[in-house]
Image (cartoon, rainbow, N blue to C red):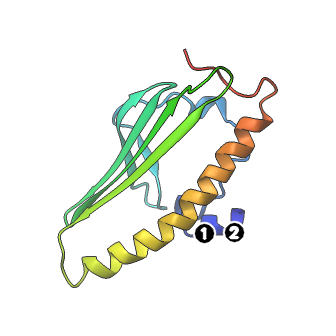
Amino acid sequence: MVQLDRFDNGGHPSARRIVPELQDLAVGDVMATSRDGAGFVVEAIDPGRSLVLVIRQPDGVVSAAFELSAPSPGRTRLVTRLRLQVRPTWRTLPWAAAIDAGDFIMFRQMMLGIRERAEAVPDGGARLP
Protein backbone atom coordinates (compact mmCIF):
# COMPACT_ATOMS: atom_id res chain seq x y z
CA MET A 1 0.00 0.00 0.00
CA VAL A 2 2.85 2.42 0.74
CA GLN A 3 3.77 2.75 -2.97
CA LEU A 4 0.50 4.67 -3.60
CA ASP A 5 1.63 7.40 -1.18
CA ARG A 6 3.73 8.93 -3.96
CA PHE A 7 0.39 10.19 -5.38
CA ASP A 8 -1.03 11.21 -2.03
CA ASN A 9 0.33 12.63 1.23
CA GLY A 10 2.76 14.86 -0.67
CA GLY A 11 4.87 11.78 -1.37
CA HIS A 12 5.33 10.99 2.33
CA PRO A 13 4.50 7.46 3.50
CA SER A 14 1.37 6.94 5.58
CA ALA A 15 1.77 6.40 9.30
CA ARG A 16 1.87 2.70 10.15
CA ARG A 17 0.75 3.33 13.72
CA ILE A 18 -1.42 5.79 15.63
CA VAL A 19 0.81 8.78 16.49
CA PRO A 20 -0.40 10.36 19.77
CA GLU A 21 1.03 13.83 19.06
CA LEU A 22 -1.03 14.01 15.84
CA GLN A 23 -4.37 13.33 17.53
CA ASP A 24 -5.21 16.90 18.61
CA LEU A 25 -6.65 18.47 15.47
CA ALA A 26 -8.48 21.78 15.70
CA VAL A 27 -10.54 23.86 13.28
CA GLY A 28 -8.14 25.72 10.99
CA ASP A 29 -5.33 23.14 11.17
CA VAL A 30 -3.87 22.11 7.80
CA MET A 31 -3.32 18.49 6.83
CA ALA A 32 -0.64 18.92 4.16
CA THR A 33 -1.06 17.04 0.89
CA SER A 34 1.88 18.61 -0.92
CA ARG A 35 5.48 19.46 -0.21
CA ASP A 36 4.67 23.19 -0.04
CA GLY A 37 2.43 22.61 3.01
CA ALA A 38 -0.88 23.20 1.22
CA GLY A 39 -3.67 20.76 1.78
CA PHE A 40 -6.93 20.03 3.56
CA VAL A 41 -8.03 22.52 6.21
CA VAL A 42 -10.00 21.21 9.19
CA GLU A 43 -13.41 22.85 8.68
CA ALA A 44 -15.27 21.09 11.51
CA ILE A 45 -14.38 18.51 14.12
CA ASP A 46 -16.19 16.65 16.88
CA PRO A 47 -13.43 14.46 18.38
CA GLY A 48 -14.31 10.80 18.35
CA ARG A 49 -17.36 11.47 16.15
CA SER A 50 -16.72 13.47 12.97
CA LEU A 51 -14.19 15.36 10.88
CA VAL A 52 -14.70 17.61 7.83
CA LEU A 53 -11.69 18.61 5.70
CA VAL A 54 -11.77 21.15 2.86
CA ILE A 55 -9.45 22.40 0.12
CA ARG A 56 -10.64 25.67 -1.42
CA GLN A 57 -9.12 26.74 -4.74
CA PRO A 58 -10.15 29.46 -7.20
CA ASP A 59 -11.69 26.89 -9.57
CA GLY A 60 -13.31 24.62 -7.03
CA VAL A 61 -13.69 23.03 -3.62
CA VAL A 62 -12.84 19.50 -2.46
CA SER A 63 -14.24 18.28 0.85
CA ALA A 64 -13.91 15.03 2.73
CA ALA A 65 -16.15 14.11 5.65
CA PHE A 66 -15.69 11.24 8.10
CA GLU A 67 -18.29 10.18 10.67
CA LEU A 68 -18.15 7.47 13.30
CA SER A 69 -21.20 5.79 14.81
CA ALA A 70 -21.76 2.78 17.06
CA PRO A 71 -24.44 0.63 15.37
CA SER A 72 -24.19 -1.99 18.12
CA PRO A 73 -22.09 -2.64 21.23
CA GLY A 74 -18.45 -3.33 20.38
CA ARG A 75 -18.80 -2.17 16.75
CA THR A 76 -17.94 1.12 15.08
CA ARG A 77 -19.04 2.23 11.64
CA LEU A 78 -17.03 4.76 9.61
CA VAL A 79 -18.89 6.63 6.87
CA THR A 80 -16.91 8.78 4.44
CA ARG A 81 -17.95 11.25 1.79
CA LEU A 82 -15.81 13.01 -0.76
CA ARG A 83 -17.33 15.96 -2.60
CA LEU A 84 -15.76 17.75 -5.54
CA GLN A 85 -17.28 20.98 -6.79
CA VAL A 86 -15.59 22.67 -9.75
CA ARG A 87 -16.40 25.40 -12.20
CA PRO A 88 -16.49 23.48 -15.52
CA THR A 89 -13.70 24.71 -17.79
CA TRP A 90 -11.31 23.05 -20.21
CA ARG A 91 -8.75 23.06 -17.39
CA THR A 92 -10.88 21.77 -14.50
CA LEU A 93 -12.82 18.95 -16.17
CA PRO A 94 -9.77 16.69 -16.82
CA TRP A 95 -8.56 17.45 -13.28
CA ALA A 96 -11.98 16.52 -11.84
CA ALA A 97 -12.02 13.23 -13.80
CA ALA A 98 -8.53 12.35 -12.54
CA ILE A 99 -9.52 13.19 -8.95
CA ASP A 100 -12.62 11.00 -9.23
CA ALA A 101 -10.66 7.97 -10.47
CA GLY A 102 -7.65 8.50 -8.21
CA ASP A 103 -9.64 9.03 -5.06
CA PHE A 104 -11.29 5.63 -5.35
CA ILE A 105 -7.84 4.04 -5.16
CA MET A 106 -6.57 6.39 -2.43
CA PHE A 107 -9.73 6.13 -0.30
CA ARG A 108 -9.53 2.33 -0.46
CA GLN A 109 -5.89 2.48 0.65
CA MET A 110 -6.82 4.86 3.46
CA MET A 111 -9.70 2.64 4.65
CA LEU A 112 -7.48 -0.47 4.64
CA GLY A 113 -4.86 1.43 6.65
CA ILE A 114 -7.45 2.66 9.17
CA ARG A 115 -8.75 -0.88 9.59
CA GLU A 116 -5.21 -2.22 10.03
CA ARG A 117 -4.40 0.34 12.74
CA ALA A 118 -7.77 -0.03 14.52
CA GLU A 119 -7.47 -3.81 14.63
CA ALA A 120 -3.92 -3.53 16.00
CA VAL A 121 -5.16 -1.74 19.15
CA PRO A 122 -5.31 -4.42 21.89
CA ASP A 123 -8.87 -3.68 23.06
CA GLY A 124 -10.19 -3.35 19.52
CA GLY A 125 -9.85 0.43 19.39
CA ALA A 126 -11.17 3.42 21.23
CA ARG A 127 -14.77 3.39 22.35
CA LEU A 128 -17.19 6.10 21.32
CA PRO A 129 -18.48 8.20 24.23
Q: Is residue 2 above or below residue 44?
A: below
Q: Name the residue under label 1.
A: 6
Q: Distance between the residues labelled 2 and 1?
A: 6 Å
Examine the image and state in which quarter residue 116 appears: top right
Q: Residue furthest bottom?
A: 90
Query: On the rendered image, what quadrant is the N terminus found in?
Result: bottom right
Q: Is residue 17 visible?
A: no
* Numbered badge on residue 3: 2
Query: On the rendered image, what quadrant is the C terminus found in?
Result: top right
Say which of 37 and 103 sits in front. Answer: 103
Q: Residue sitting at 56 percent across and 27 percent down?
A: 71
Horizontally, residue 25 falls left or right of residue 84, namely right
Q: Are marks 2 and 1 in contact (CB under 8 Å)?
A: yes
Q: Can residue 107 be seen in this view?
A: yes
**Amino acid type shown at disc 1:** Arg
* Numbered badge on residue 119: none
Q: Residue sitting at 43 percent across and 54 percent down?
A: 37
Q: Where is residue 13 in the image (x, y as percent from the top left)?
A: 66, 58
Q: Is mark 2 on a helix, strand or loop?
A: helix
Horizontally, residue 14 falls left or right of residue 30, namely right
Badge 2 local density, few (<14 within 10 Å), some, or many (20+)? few
Badge 1 local density, few (<14 within 10 Å), some, or many (20+)? few
**Amino acid type shown at disc 2:** Gln
Q: Position of residue 36 (x, y in %)?
A: 43, 60
Q: Residue sitting at 67 percent across and 52 percent down?
A: 112
Q: How many numbered discs, if any? A: 2
Q: Residue furthest front?
A: 72
Q: Position of residue 89 (x, y in %)?
A: 18, 80
